[in-house]
Image (spheres, rainbow, N blue to C red):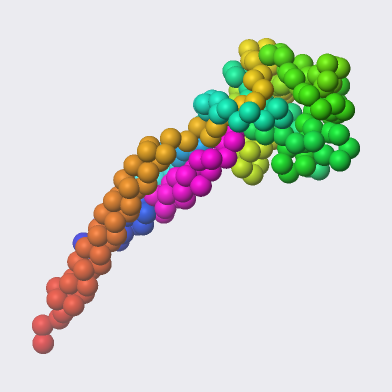
Amino acid sequence: MFIQNRLGLIESTESMLAQSQRLNQVTNNLANVDTPGYKKEDITFWEMLYTTNQNRQRVGKALKIITNQQEGSAKNTGNQLDFAISGDGFFKLQTPEGIRYSRAGNFLINNQGQLVNPAGHLVLGTGGPIVITGNEVAVAQNGSLSADGINAGQFDIVFFNDLTGIEKEGTNLFRLKEGETQEEPATNFSVKQGFVESANVTLVTEMTTMLDLHRAYETQQKVIITFDEMDSKAINSVGKLAI
């Protein structure tokens, strides 16, 4: 019985650890519900059979973090330096660590007249960093920019055939995984000015998930307490030698 109880404790502990990590992801999603371009994270669970020793196998639990790349809704801001991509594609940014990608189009103009994101990373066009020299900025659906009616370049919107080939770096940036398929020019998109893409987080769904996780976590706690009481009874009662 002690061995069976021990396995039950291990199973319950693994379940609690997995639920705890899932709860962290849900909390992070809720914290970024108002972050432009944020892509929520989900966790998938599965079980695997592995060998613990030469005579016994047991089922273990595994999990994997998955980024949900579903497009968020476009939020009207009225800001001429806010841009939202409708369809496939990512804005391309130059950072100190190299090229990064983002769906967040809430941009600014720095002291050099360059278009940057809130972190100061340069927004790249098809010919390099985008420079705005005028006051009235306009954009065409294909990402072509103008300032006071003068051409200011075109957003370098890129696409990935396999979105699992990019991974999150921080809240709003993505980087290409080593050895994965390179970027391609995006074609199935349009750019909207005065809008930003909202986070693809549904508040009600995430709150419901959080409540379910809390209940599941508490259930596993009760299971562990039960197994602990059973072990204690076996040790203190059943295991006593008659004198």
Image quarter hosting the N terminus: bottom left
* Vertical arrangement, residue 217 with respect to residue 47, above or below: below
Q: Residue at x 37, y 44 (%)?
A: 207
Is 103 situated left or right of 6 in this image?
A: right
* Magenta stretch prevailing secondary structure: helix
The x and y percentages for residue 217 are: 32, 54
The x and y percentages for residue 72 are: 53, 28
Between 26 and 238, the residue placed more toward the observer is 26
* Vertical arrangement, residue 34 with respect to residue 1, above or below: above
- Res 169 → quadrant: top right
Is 209 situated left or right of 175 in this image?
A: left
Viewer can see residue 54: no
The x and y percentages for residue 116 are: 77, 36
- Res 131 → quadrant: top right
Between 129 and 176, the residue placed more toward the observer is 129
What's the magenta region? 17-39
Image quarter hosting the C terminus: bottom left
Q: Residue at x 73, y 18 (%)?
A: 139
